[in-house]
């Protein structure tokens, strides 16, 4: 069993390649229990959040990615990609759930969840 | 087969230590063992290369002709003899019998061991491309490779292509360029050395390499190596491009050399699996260096080798039987002369990281320190990497840097010189000879001297007299501190232009000026030249810079989709539920049965919930799903409709009344002029949205006097109005002038739009721009100075080009990834709130 099939046997779902997400961009994964936003930052890091702004449920996957944050496309809340917390003027007002994402050999995996 | 006494040794009291691999790891391990206990082992070394041990990481300078092979030898033949080491060089080991504890080498030589060290290193990865067997296709791993590359470089006019924009590939390309070859690096990713560098540093590296004769092709997928008569002639990329070459170097990574271990029945994953004491699954066999896999990581850099060898020697000699190796933090330095690049730390994962960014445009410096929980977690340094080692030490020691955070980015000398002082006493404590302004070379004493001698009181005064802080402005806070210290309460902070955003101290006007004056051609170039304090800007400055660059370089700038707000990225308007609205263009507010029928069909076919008339005389289709957008556009395109740009900072609508065609009061063909204006202006990008209207008589049914630009037709011609608004602010237009012909009206309006495009700040509507610069300025530039008007008109037309419909482009497949989910799964996806598992 190679490393990738082993990962999948542990319940991780292959959702695509790192290169499928533009640098400083995001893509959306549609799952049974709602969408997940997968982000790729300018320094090549990968983050995943529920695709919902804590403010008015805007799709964060459609926002502008800058540093390790995304600007929600609806009302420009800035959300920390690592923690899901609102930043700046809206700090402390809400938090988007973080989704565990695994990067292995250029592939991306989400945990099939509870 | 000769049997070389496997079970007895001349020095029978000694244990037999056999090392497979005469490279950096094998020899370092021996040195470490000897340093602890020179008498414990009788040592035998096998090396596959017919040479003594040399410093493999210095092959790059050898290739570049900056060092000779003799310079990079670590242990010469005498070292082996002096330490009683038996060296079998040029003799590869072919098998290990772990049961009998002996190794078999080429030629049938058998040697027994009590302890065996595997230091077999790694092999370069050869891409499975057609043509890989051609002569002139090489890897970059050992001295033989270097010799082949040097031979190729000696052919006059020879060209080289290097696949792989990592550390090794860049060093190879630089070396070949230095030897006179035309060298091109082909890299799969969009950033060079993307594992070590962020985009900003990668951009600077690309530029620096270009200056040294190394061209770069990013985002390039190799398809086939081309050849003639068995000799390489070029590389073909997936996009069809062909890069001619006489030498092709593959530098795309390494693979641990674990074949021997696997054949011997040891546990092997990517590399030989070892525990924290470097022991393999056989207790007498150890593995170190690039052939080993420790805690799932097979390292490809030299620093972990030193750490591994220390632990191994402690264990083997009993110096510290409990010694453990717990993995290495990595740092990287690129060995290209005059290009100072350092990178350290992990750049993946990690919650709550913060960046400190410093840029010095005049010196080409970019520094970024990543702080996590008060400690240095990573560093990228470009242009000045002198403090790399210091940051790396802070990182490895886990030093809390909260107290030195303010000055950390300026490096060790300043930080340690000012430790424990508050900012103003820190400045007070600086010596008069210490440099404040790096751009202009101004010392503290010069500034304080000028303040006193010339009675200076403001920042601008100091800039005028000493030039300090007058260039990049990054030392402005220090100069202000000096003013405060010298003048006490006599200092008044200057209020300069408002910065564009928190990423910069520059205002919009200055940024626009510099883009044109310095011919800055990309967002990373602007950020470096104007010393942005964030790595890649924010959602406020990036769209502005993208617009300014499009405006300044209409033919050459490559639009950055990731720097556009979602609406402009997908050419539709996002709605509160994440669906989109679609507004096709209706020229001058005219439509037809065919268009209306197509709209009706689209509404039914895609189950579009709401259809509404807009205020700009067209039809809005609301609630379209993102994945349906391209199909909706395809159907609208088929009926001849194009994007209405209802989402754009660009031309929206040209509203008209029916004019002389139908109206009994109409004085001119207002509908026709409206259509012509819309056809002239559509598909342009502007600082903010632009709405026009043309009314056929002063009754003004098209409401032209509250538009950005309005035309009121009168018997004798056309009144041109500018600067109206009917949004948050209500403002009537001002009359700019009156013209006699339709052609002149169009010429003038295009010129006004171009002046606005070139001069206004991003998101500044025409009425606000006019309030800032004055109606007089617009009048002077477009009505009085006809030569200038002509220039503006011509530049506008160049920028308009072919006026391509963005919907049609996307129907054809452009930006396809924008319109489809990355993946769809019937599974539920766990998030941290539900599973409480840590992210990996």
Image (cartoon, coloured by chain):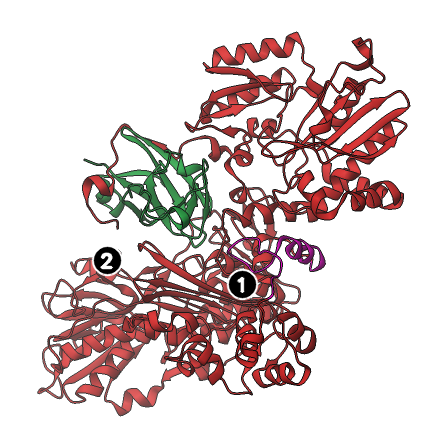
Q: Which residues are magenta?
A: B494-518
- The earlier-in-sequence mark between 1 and 2 is 1
Q: Nearer the viewer, residue B2 or B539?
A: B539
> Which residue is found at the position 19% from the left and 45% from the top?
B836
Tell which chain the image draws in green: A
Q: Measured from the top left, where is residue B276 in percent x and y?
A: 17, 67
Q: Main secondary structure of the magenta part?
A: loop
In the displayed structure, would residue A15 be above or below residue B297?
Answer: above
Rendering coords of residue A14 (x, y %): 30, 38
Question: On the image, numbered disc 1 is attached to which residue?
Answer: B205
The residue indicated by pointer 2 is B296
State yes or no: residue B140 in magenta: no
Chain bearing mark 1: B
Q: Is residue B327 left or right of residue A76?
A: left
- Of badges 1 and 2, the one in the foreground is 1
B84 lies above or below B597: below
Q: Quadrant of residue B214?
A: bottom right
Q: Is residue B505 magenta?
A: yes
Image position of B172 with respect to A42: above or below: below
- Do tag 1 and tag 2 residues touch (Cβ < 8 Å)? no
Residue B5 x/y as whole percent: 13, 79
């Amino acid at each position: 069993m190679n490393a990738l099939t082993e990962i999948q046997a542990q319940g991780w779902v292959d959702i695509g390649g790192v290169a499928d997400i533009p640098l400083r961009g995001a893509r959306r994964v549609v799952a049974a229990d709602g969408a997940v936003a997968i982000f790729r930052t300018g320094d090549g890091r990968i983050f995943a959040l529920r695709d919902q702004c804590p403010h008015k449920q805007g799709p964060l996957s459609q926002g502008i990615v800058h540093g390790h944050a995304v600007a929600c496309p609806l009302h420009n809340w800035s959300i920390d990609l690592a923690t899901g917390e609102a930043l700046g003027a809206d700090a402390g007002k809400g938090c988007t759930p973080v989704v565990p994402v695994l990067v292995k050999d250029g592939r991306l995996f989400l945990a099939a969840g509870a | 087969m000769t049997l070389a006494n496997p079970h007895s040794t001349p020095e029978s009291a000694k244990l037999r230590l056999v090392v497979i691999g005469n490279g950096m790891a094998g020899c370092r391990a021996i040195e470490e063992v000897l340093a602890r206990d020179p008498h414990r082992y009788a040592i035998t070394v096998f090396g596959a290369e017919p040479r003594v041990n040399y410093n493999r990481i210095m092959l790059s300078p050898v290739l570049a002709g900056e060092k000779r092979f003799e310079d990079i030898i670590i242990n010469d033949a005498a070292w082996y003899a002096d330490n009683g080491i038996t060296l079998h060089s040029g003799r590869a080991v072919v098998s290990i019998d772990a049961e009998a504890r002996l190794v078999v080498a080429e030629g049938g030589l058998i040697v027994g061991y009590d302890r065996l060290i595997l230091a077999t290193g790694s092999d370069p990865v050869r891409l499975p491309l057609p043509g890989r067997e051609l002569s002139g296709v090489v890897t970059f791993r050992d001295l033989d490779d270097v010799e082949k590359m040097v031979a190729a470089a000696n052919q006059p006019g020879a060209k080289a292509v290097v696949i792989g924009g990592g550390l090794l590939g860049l060093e190879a390309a630089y070396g070949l360029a230095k030897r006179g070859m035309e060298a091109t690096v082909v890299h799969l990713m969009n950033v060079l050395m993307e594992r070590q560098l962020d985009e900003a540093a990668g951009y600077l590296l690309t530029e620096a390499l270009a200056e040294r004769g190394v061209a770069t092709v990013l985002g390039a997928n190799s398809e086939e190596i081309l050849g003639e008569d068995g000799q390489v002639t070029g590389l073909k990329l997936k996009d069809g491009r062909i890069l001619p070459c006489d030498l092709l170097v593959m530098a795309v990574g390494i693979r641990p050399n674990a074949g021997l271990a696997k054949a011997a029945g040891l546990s092997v994953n990517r590399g030989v699996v070892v525990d924290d004491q470097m022991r393999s699954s056989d207790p007498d066999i150890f593995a170190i260096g690039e052939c080993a896999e420790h805690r799932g990581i097979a390292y490809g850099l030299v620093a972990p080798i030193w750490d591994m060898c220390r632990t191994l020697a402690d264990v083997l000699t009993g110096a510290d039987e409990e010694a453990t190796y717990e993995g290495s933090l990595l740092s990287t330095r690129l060995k290209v002369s005059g290009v100072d690049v350092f990178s350290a730390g992990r750049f993946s994962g990690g919650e709550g990281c913060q960046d400190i960014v410093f840029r010095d445009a005049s010196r080409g410096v970019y520094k970024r320190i990543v702080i996590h929980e008060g400690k240095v977690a990573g560093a990228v340094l470009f242009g000045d990497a002198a403090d790399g080692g210091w940051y790396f030490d802070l990182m490895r020691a886990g030093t809390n840097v909260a107290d030195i955070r303010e000055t950390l980015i300026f490096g060790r000398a300043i930080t340690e010189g000012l430790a424990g002082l508050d900012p103003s006493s820190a400045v007070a404590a600086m010596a008069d000879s210490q440099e404040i302004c790096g751009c202009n070379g101004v010392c503290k004493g010069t500034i304080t001297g000028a303040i006193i001698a010339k009675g200076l009181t403001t920042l601008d005064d100091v800039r005028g007299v000493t030039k300090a802080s007058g260039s990049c402005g990054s030392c402005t806070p220090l100069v202000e501190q000096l003013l405060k210290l010298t003048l006490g309460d006599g200092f008044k902070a200057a209020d300069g232009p408002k910065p564009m955003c928190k990423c910069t101290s520059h205002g919009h006007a200055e940024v626009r000026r510099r883009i044109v004056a310095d011919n800055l051609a990309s967002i990373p170039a602007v950020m470096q030249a104007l010393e942005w304090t964030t790595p890649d800007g924010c959602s406020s400055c990036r769209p502005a810079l993208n617009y300014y660059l499009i405006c300044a370089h209409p033919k050459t700038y490559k639009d950055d989709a990731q720097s556009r707000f979602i609406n402009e990225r997908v050419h539709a308007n996002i709605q509160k539920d994440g669906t989109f609205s679609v507004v096709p263009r209706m020229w001058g507010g005219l439509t037809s049965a065919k268009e209306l029928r197509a709209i009706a069909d689209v509404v039914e076919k895609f189950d579009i919930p709401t259809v509404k008339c807009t205020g700009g005389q067209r039809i809005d289709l609301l609630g379209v799903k993102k994945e349906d957008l391209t199909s909706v556009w395809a159907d609208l395109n088929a009926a001849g409709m194009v994007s209405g740009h209802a989402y754009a900072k660009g031309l929206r609508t040209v509203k008209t009344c029916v004019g002389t065609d139908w109206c009994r009061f109409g004085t001119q063909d207002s509908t026709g002029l409206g259509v012509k204006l819309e056809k002239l202006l559509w598909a342009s990008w502007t600082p903010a949205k632009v709405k026009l209207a043309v009314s056929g008589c002063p009754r003004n049914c098209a409401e032209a006097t509250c538009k950005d630009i309005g035309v009121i037709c009168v018997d004798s011609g056309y009144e041109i109005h500018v600067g109206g608004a009917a949004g948050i602010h209500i403002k009537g237009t001002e009359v700019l002038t009156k013209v006699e012909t339709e052609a002149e009206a169009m010429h003038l309006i295009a010129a006004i739009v171009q002046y606005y495009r070139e001069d206004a700040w991003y998101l500044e509507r025409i009425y606000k721009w006019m309030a800032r610069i004055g109606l007089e300025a617009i009048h002077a530039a477009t009505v009085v100075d006809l030569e200038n008007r002509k220039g503006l008109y011509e530049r506008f037309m160049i920028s308009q080009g072919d006026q391509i419909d963005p919907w049609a482009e996307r129907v054809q497949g452009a930006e396809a990834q924008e319109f489809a989910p990355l993946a769809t799964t019937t599974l539920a996806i766990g998030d941290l709130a539900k599973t409480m598992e840590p992210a990996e």
